[in-house]
Image (tube, grey):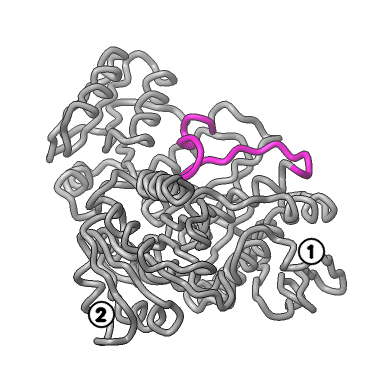
Amino acid sequence: MPLEGHIVVLGLGRSGMAAAQHIAAHADADVRVSVYDAAYGPALEERAQLLRSAGIEVELGASDVASGAALVVASPGIPPASPLMRSALCTGAPVISEIELAYRVSRSPWLAVTGTNGKTTTTMLVAHLLRTAGIPCETVGNIGDPAIGIAGDTGEATVLVTEVSSFQLALTERFHPHVSVLLNVTPDHIDWHGSLEAYARDKGRVFANQGPGDVAVIDIDDPGAAAFVEPVAGQGVRVIRVSLGAPCDDGAGVIGGRLVVRRGDRETVLVAADELAIRGEHNVSNALAASAAALAAGADPDSVREGLRTFRPVAHRLEPVGEVGGAEYFNDSKATNPDAVLKALTAFDDRPLIVLLGGRNKGNDFRGLAEAVAARCRAAVLFGEAGPQIARAFPEGSLPLVVAGDLAAATDAANDLARPGDVVVLSPACASFDEFSSYEERGERFRDLVSMLAEKDGE
């Protein structure tokens, strides 16, 4: 893809930084590269100086983009309604995402995983299955390195397994994975997209350029995902339908407690669901989708079986982080919306459960979640900016509630409530940005807090 004229990058996060560096390194000397970010501060200024030393223009605290751009590459954190994005759209230049730019410069086949929940675990599992099968691959996108930093250097033998968000997909034009996976579509990021319909539409862009010879793996147990089956099949795409029930003629499902992938009369029996190290019915669905995708990408059944047995939980996704006083603690910090918490509630059979909920709300209604938590949990600890709002969603007296100011206070409160045999899980249903820079930082802090409690308990 030729890089010409004035190229603008919006956002100085990981993907923006990588995009600017790639463009500057691969463009002709007469190409002008500018980076705009609405924020400012010491960390951003340090990044800006690094780019400026490479001849890249950087403007922090920006709200307007200069006219005359030939192409705009937008980071996923830039909301459509922000002044910076509106200004970029007014230039008349094409506005694309970093993942779209990476696709345009790559020669590798792409395998894309999206969905409201489960996409990181599924992406990592697909990559694990392919590597077990001896198929070279790289994980890029929302996990691993920014795609633009890798895509131009890999060849046709390496599969780029990418976790793609609705933010990234919203600004794609040519992005064309050979294998796509849609896990689910439930309310999330409504504050960014404006409506559930717009959010679903952007998720569906993962299929936009697929056609005959391509494969779409779609979970039909989820109504939001199932709605795409017929339109995508109408494009000539082979659709593999995933369900926790028995598989259809071209599908993946469960028969007699074992994961099975079927195509016509050929049935591939994989492993028993209880052989998986990842917990919960939702992870059985994720394993089915990952297996179907890996087989479609060329993995052999024996390698898929081995990979399913050897894959371990991903950090911040129902990750076991310790035991205190006979209670087990799990870090599910990646559960940043109510639907993700609903899935976590199914992962521990009938064991007594204490859940930590809170952070920054992303425009979600917590009433349905409160009803499910009251029915399943022994107690709930509500914390952070959204803690009082979540508390109001619970009917009075439905279960013991504790409202805490921050994560540390919430962890202490959960420890006070916990009894031997209980499960304590941080599954917040909210973003982390009221207290932390990312869900990873929040999960790491929870892990440290549990470790400190365990040390005290052992004294």
Estimate the x, y position of residue 361 in percent, counting from the top left: 25, 63
- At x 51% / y 51%, what residue is drawn? 321
* Residue 76 place in picture, x, y as percent: 34, 46
**Quarter of the image where one finds residue 240:** bottom right
Could you tell me residue 304's position as x and y percent? 77, 53
Relative vertical location of residue 106 with respect to residue 142 in this rendering, above or below: above
| Residue at (63% x, 42% y) in the render | 109
- Say if the magenta span includes residue 174: no
Q: Nearer the viewer, residue 300 or 270?
A: 270
Mark 2, residue position: 393
Q: State the residue at coordinates (44%, 67%).
A: 340
User: Is residue 212 positioned above or below 2 on the image?
Assistant: below
- What is the magenta range? 132-151
Asked if the magenta segment contains residue 147, the reply would be yes
Element assignment for label 2: helix
> Which label lies toward us, 1 or 2?
2
410 on left or right of 207? left
Q: Which mark is residue 271?
A: 1
In terms of sequence position, does the residue under pointer 1 or pointer 2 come before the other? Answer: 1
* Outermost residue toward the right in this view: 265
Q: Amino acid at mark 2?
A: Ala
Can residue 208 be seen by looking at this rendering? no
376 or 2: nearer the eye?
Answer: 376
- The residue nearer to you, when weighing 157 against 458, is 458
Rate crowding at label 1 as few (under 14), some (14 to 19) or many (20 or more) other CA atoms within 10 Å.
some
- Label total for image: 2
Residue at image location 83% in from the left, 67% down from the top: 269
